[in-house]
Each structure stands twice: as C-alpha cells, then as structure tokens.
Amino acid sequence: MTGPLSALIRDRRVIICCGAGGVGKTTTATALALAAARGGRKVLALTIDPSKRLAETLGVERNLREPVSLSPERLAAAGIAAPGGLETWMLDPQLISDRTISGLADDPREAARLKENRIYKQISRMVAGMQEYTAMEALHGFLKEERYDLIVLDTPPSRHALDFLDGPRRLERFFDGRIFQLFKPSEESGFIRQAASKLIGQVLSSVFGESNYRDLQEFFVAFAPLFSILTHNAGDMFRRLSDPKDCGFLLVCSPSSEAIVDALHFRDKTNELDLPFAGFILNRSMAGETDRVMPHAGLFGPDPSPLQRGALQKLLRLAHIEQAEAARHLILLNDLTKAAGKAAFATALPNFPSGANDLSTLVELADVVD
Ligand SMILES: Nc1ncnc2c1ncn2[C@@H]1O[C@H](COP(=O)(O)OP(=O)(O)OP(=O)(O)O)[C@@H](O)[C@H]1O
Ligand SMILES: [Mg+2]
C-alpha cells in the first residue's frame, strides 16, 4: 500500500464520500471498503439507497435492521481474509429515523404513536437534511460501540456535494423556523399571546381540517424536544468528525467542467466548517490512458487492403477523440491536485465502460485504491 488513498484506508476510522448526484459515491465507498478489508481491517460500508444491482452483487439485502457480513464465498472472491472483514449496511433513511425516535421516546407505546403521526411520516422523508442526519446518527452509534476499525460512509444522492455537510444545520433551521413557531403552542401565559395562539389554532384547523391540525400540533409538541436532542447530537457528531487523525472527507467528482468549481467549493466549505478534507477522487477518469497505443497500418500486415485502410482511418479518428478526452482529464487531475494543496490529494479512478456493478470490477477498483 503506497498511494494517498491507501494511507487513508489504513489509518482513518471514518471516511466520508461526498459528491454530486450520480458521480460514483456509492461505488467508490464500496471499493474503498473492499480495499481496506483486503488490507486486514474490520470494515463497515454504510451505503445509502444503493442500486438493487449493487446489493445483488454483494449478496446483501437492502433495508436490513443492522449491518451484515458478506458471505464467506463473496469475501473469498473479493480476496478478503481474516483478520480483515467486510460488513455492509444498505441504509434506508426511514428505518434509521424510526430507530432514532424509538431510542428517544420515553416508552415503546409513545414511540409507536409518534411514528404513526402522519406529519412525521411525511416529514421524515421530506425534510431536507433528515437523510443526512440519519446517516450521521447511525455513524455516531457505531463509533461509540467501536465495533469496526473503519467505517466508510456513503452520502445520499443530492444535487450538491455539500448538502451532506449542511444537512443537520438545515434541519435545525427548519425546527427553529417560522413554520415551527407558528404551530408550536405558546408557552407564554400572557392573555394576548394566548388569544393570538387560539386564533391561529382556529384559523389553521379551518385551513388544514381539524384532524390534520391536531396531527400537526402533536408533531411539533412531541418532536420539538426530540429534535433538539438530535441537533445536539449532530453538534457532537461534527466535533467527532473534525479530528483529522480519525476522519477524512473525500469529494468524488466526475470529469465534467463543473468538477473544479465543486472541488474548490468543497475544499473551502470543509475548511470553514473545520472538517478534515482529505482529497478529491476523479472518478470515471481516462487520465491514466494518455499513452495508449494508437492504431497504425502495421496492424493489418505489410500490405493493407483499401478496406482496411478505410477502417484504420475511422479507428484513428476515434482514437484521437479518446486521446483528447484523456488529455483533458489529465489537465483536470492536475488542477485538482493544485486545488487540494499540500495537506490533501487528488487521485483518479478509471472508467469501466460497462459500469462498476459486478464484484470483479469493484475488486479491480479496490486494486487501484491499494
Ligand atoms: N469508475 C466507474 N466506472 C464505471 N462505472 C462506474 C464507475 N463509478 C460508478 N459507476 C457507475 O455509475 C453509476 C452511478 O454510480 P453510483 O451509484 O456509485 O453513484 P452515486 O454518486 O452513489 O449516485 P447517487 O447520487 O444517485 O447516490 C452506477 O451504475 C455505477 O456502476
Ligand atoms: Mg449513491
């Protein structure tokens, strides 16, 4: 193990893969976890809403109640042997959210009642930040248990790479916000305040319907203290994730023109939040392919036919397009390396034209990481 990624998977306890939608966060997280497990560590890959295909490849069901190990056959096929191990948990955000509520409510009946609340049902899926929060919550629990040497955390699909970092704060804003205040029953006892509150109650119940309004009110009364604990936990979590010896944030990006803008923003934002930025991964990159052998007439023997010459011209045109693309990726990788600075790195993972959903391709990716 020599490269910057190999040092990361050998030394850190938490690696968090961030990135815009569809860039390969889940794939990269899985490959990193495989590589670390092959290196002898006990690893948990915590992936979020992974594709059915990936779940089948790993032979693991989604939405289980807790992490499960890959089967001995699959571990062997991936080259993982004791003391290394690989568990995965394909996280359903709803499930974690429910567990969090169960953990915080006073008794199981209260928890069941809260989970039945219609607003909660909607909101636990809808509120921006809930998925990010629940991922962090799960991570928090595992870290406290010290069950794994390394946890690789994938982050939810989002338009923007930094949504993950902003999640808990958005949640906090929501609960501190005006909508929340509007529904929260007044704690102040002043007559005007009480009258205003009653009036608001009447108006809202006529707008939303009596039973909806009651659900809303129950939701805000019951959840306000719970969510204040949650946001407090998020603060604690942020502190844990701030230790550069323990944790590393990676930005996975695709070789698109936005990559460098996203990268600079990610670097500055992690810096601003005091989170240990570890590096950039340029996924699906052809940067390593600039020295490919070009097609030439000799391929067809000493005397190529006109048909073969025609075919060669076509091949050459395609090869030049690919070469230009590879050169562009290499420039991008160099720009990312500069943007990463001395304390971090930029590295490329190759593109597999037929996707990276099967075990042998994931293992190939893990080999690159090593
Ligand atoms: N290096 C690669 N070579 C080829 N295909 C890849 C590579 N990396 C990812 N893919 C493919 O791209 C698709 C998207 O990858 P993945 O699910 O990892 O992205 P994601 O960032 O997690 O997406 P989302 O934001 O939706 O969660 C998958 O089909 C995966 O197999
Ligand atoms: Mg994903």
Image (cartoon, helix red, strand yellow):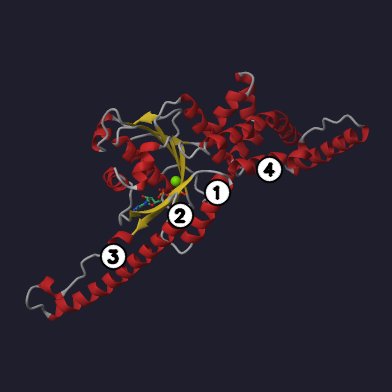
- Disc on res. 341: 2
Q: Earlier along the polypeptide chain: callout 4 or callout 3?
A: 4
Mark 1: few, some, or many residues within 10 Å (few <14, many ≥20)?
Answer: few
Which residue matches tag 3?
Answer: 290
Q: Earlier along the polypeptide chain: callout 1 or callout 2?
A: 1
Foreground disc of the pair 2, 4? 2
Q: CA distance from mark 2 to mark 4?
A: 33 Å
CB contact under 8 Å: marks 1 and 4: no
Mark 3: few, some, or many residues within 10 Å (few <14, many ≥20)?
Answer: some
The amino acid sitting under disc 2 is Gly
Which residue matches tag 1?
Answer: 271
| Secondary structure beneath label 3 | loop
Mark 4: few, some, or many residues within 10 Å (few <14, many ≥20)?
Answer: few
Task: In the rendered view, tell whether residue 227 sits above or below residue 312.
Answer: above
Q: CA distance from mark 1 to mark 3?
A: 33 Å
Foreground disc of the pair 1, 3? 1
Foreground disc of the pair 4, 3? 3
CB contact under 8 Å: marks 4 and 3: no
Task: In the rendered view, tell whether residue 266 sits above or below residue 40.
Answer: below
Q: Earlier along the polypeptide chain: callout 1 or callout 3?
A: 1
- Disc on res. 173: 4
CB contact under 8 Å: marks 2 and 4: no
Task: In the rendered view, tell whether residue 120 sits above or below residue 322.
Answer: above
| Position of residue 115 measured from the top left corner of the image (x, y, whole percent) | 61, 29
